[in-house]
Amino acid sequence: MLRYKVAIIGAGPAGYFAAQALHNLQNDERTFSIDMIERLPTPWGLVRSGVAPDHPKIKTVSKVFEKIAADPNFHLFANVEIGTDITVAQLAAAYDAVIIATGSSIGKKLGIPGEDLYGSISAADFVPWYNAHPDFAHVDFPLDCESAAVIGAGNVAMDVARILALEPSELDPTDTADHAIDALKKSAVRDVYISARRGPEHAAFTSPELRELPKLEHTNVVMARHDIDAAIQRAGEAPEKDVKSNLDAMVLIADSQKSEHERTMHFLFQHTPKEILGTDRVEGVVYSTPTGDVTIKCGLVITAIGYQAAPINGVPYENGKVVNIDGRVKENIYVVGWAKRGPSGVIGTNKSDAAAVIDLLNSDLSEPKNDSGIENLLTTQVVIDQLSWQRINEAETAAGEPKGKPRVKSVDRNELLKFAGL
Ligand code: NAP
């Protein structure tokens, strides 16, 4: 029997699906002992700190993660940071293979004047703020303005715009951070402008997300019918299936009945941000459009124009990704998920992506190393293992129960350690 030890860095969807793919390759001849290393005290990556809290169904994939974690060959090492507590080089020396699954956490910048003003932030800060990520609980941005601009036409922009434009009490039965619900309840924002630099036929939204907009109970959603008609013309007679599905959904939004709601989400197409106006803080955005410049007055700008991976010491990095060929990085180091291919696809995309990389890894393996793995390398760090995480998980869900929420997430690392019994 060949027993291989594999380290997976990052406990998000890509990491769990890599673990699952390794598990599926086990047979009478080889087994894989998997050590999953996570910087935060809690696992699940974007399922915990990225997926919109008003989309609880998407989060049910965490049940799959916990099933993967129940395998006796799976070991969680959360609260362990690469670069601080342990290096990739140390892991590569101790394990038969190392898989990087650290995602893309840095928001891309527009590179236009005014982007650094107070009131201009990235979705990479806003999304983890409302999702109770411990590192983002104190992000400072204003909600005292009547209008906000969200830049980008992807699903992250859509999540951000929806969270800003919802009646905040709709978030009460969700696991949105308490600090975010409190702030959103005090928010003066009533008009949210979401802008695409190209036409509706090029928008990166997906149609299920568009189709839920006319169902919002307390928010009007405004899309100009002439924008959609022009896009239908441009898309021609046989548009791709996804484009047709999006345009059909957009027609429904454009034609939807508007009510007396005080909150409105406005879609702007062919609006390319040119400058963010303001002296001490954001006062507006100037867009160039086919008919000339347009200024939207607003006190908050959130850019949701894609992400880049954070570089990792000792790992080749270029264009916001880990340099790789089909997931192979160098020697016994591999990469999966957004750190490999860039920030694209839905959670399930990571399953086939990870399986393909694990097939390569498996074919590269020779004799197993005879090393004890991470235990020898971590001397002082307080490690949250699977059992400790289960205690946190139970404490958070128990705290949610009386409030009718799936859980109350703690944003305090010390409290998380206390829940973990450490
Ligand atoms: P995305 O889907 O790639 O969308 C990025 C958007 O930013 C595009 O509309 C792009 O426009 C625009 N953009 C890029 N550079 C720009 C610039 N300089 N100025 C103005 N606009 C610019 O990325 P995302 O929204 O971050 O989402 C990442 C992935 O996660 C996607 O695959 C998404 O579907 C997925 N996701 C899924 C869900 C869900 O399933 N509910 C939720 C959230 C995220 P151009 O097309 O013109 O470049």
Image (cartoon, rainbow, N blue to C red):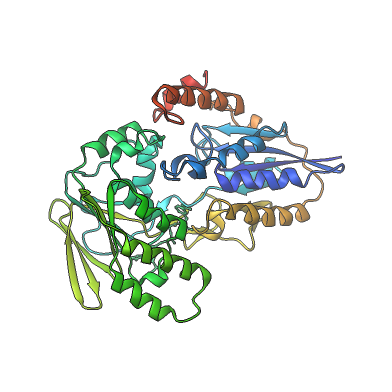
Picture coordinates of residue 74 (x, y %)?
A: 68, 35
The residue at 39%/42% (across/down) is: 128
The residue at 52%/27% (across/down) is: 393
Picture coordinates of residue 160 (x, y %)?
A: 34, 50
The answer to whether any part of residue 412 appears in the image is yes
> Which of the four quarters of the rendered structure image does ligand 1 lie in?
bottom left
**Residue 384 is drawn in which quadrant?**
top right
Picture coordinates of residue 51 (x, y %)?
A: 45, 45
Is 276 situated above or below 197?
above
For the N terminus, the quadrant is: top right
Q: Residue furthest left?
A: 279
The residue at 35%/46% (across/down) is: 125
The answer to whether any part of residue 138 appears in the image is no
Given residues 222 and 190, the one toward you in this image is: 222
**Residue 12 is drawn in which quadrant?**
top right
Picture coordinates of residue 174 (x, y %)?
A: 40, 35
- How many numbered marks are there? 0
Given residues 130 and 404, the one toward you in this image is: 404
Q: Is residue 50 left or right of residue 1?
A: left
**Residue 144 is drawn in which quadrant?**
top left
Is 69 situated above or below 143?
above
